[in-house]
Amino acid sequence: MTTSTMLWIAVGLLIVWRMYSRIRRLIGRQRSRAWRHWAAAIFFPLLIVLLGLGALKSPLAFLALTAGLAAGIGLAVWGLRLTQFEKSDLGYFYTPNAHIGIAISIVFVARMGYRLIQIMALTGAEAQLAAQDFGRSPLTLVIVGTMAGYYAAYAIGLLRWRAEAKTQPVINAL
């Protein structure tokens, strides 16, 4: 086994572990942490801008990113409507719809894994070109756009709920 192969295996295992922990976090009641929502509300739009700058060279790639972003925002609005919110003496809590978040995460990881396997199968100059085009593939961009749009819009929705909940009475927890 080469060092490069071991590195790819390590990265793959890291991705699988993060995916598992992410999916576990999507299921069930969660404590709302403002810093986490702010981080998502800032990071994902920055990611979209950076990808958008790279996709400007290809109208199809830019359109795919924009379509993914619109789909992600739509899914976030739908997901926020399905979310159960709770303000108690213990803090702010929410229970998201697990199906939407899990589906978006699995599609994203599957696409990233597929693209990485494609790049690993290539050698030399072909691999360098494929790596450079990694973020310009329309299918990849529509998936990344959907994920980034969803998590950014969902985080903004959670921040709005927290701001509104501050004016509401507290429900006593048992």
Image (cartoon, grey):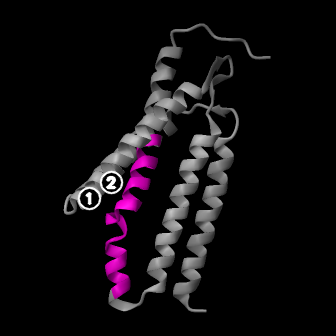
Q: Quadrant of residue 61?
A: bottom left
Q: Which residues are magenta?
A: 126-150
Q: Nearer the viewer, residue 113 or 5?
A: 113
- Circle 1 residue: 60
Q: Residue 148: image x %, image y %?
A: 42, 47
Task: Please determine whether, in this image, residue 12 is positioned above or below residue 110.
Answer: below
Please state, as top left, top right, bottom left or bottom right, where the N terminus lies in the image. bottom right
Lateral position of residue 27 relative to residue 146, left or right: right
Q: Residue 5: image x %, image y %?
A: 56, 85
Amino acid type, label 2: Ala
The residue furthest top is 169
Q: Quadrant of residue 129?
A: bottom left
- Circle 2 residue: 64
Label 1 and label 2: CA atoms lie apart by: 6 Å
Q: What secondary structure do most residues of the magenta stretch adopt?
A: helix
Query: CB of mark 1 within 8 Å of CB of mark 2?
Result: yes
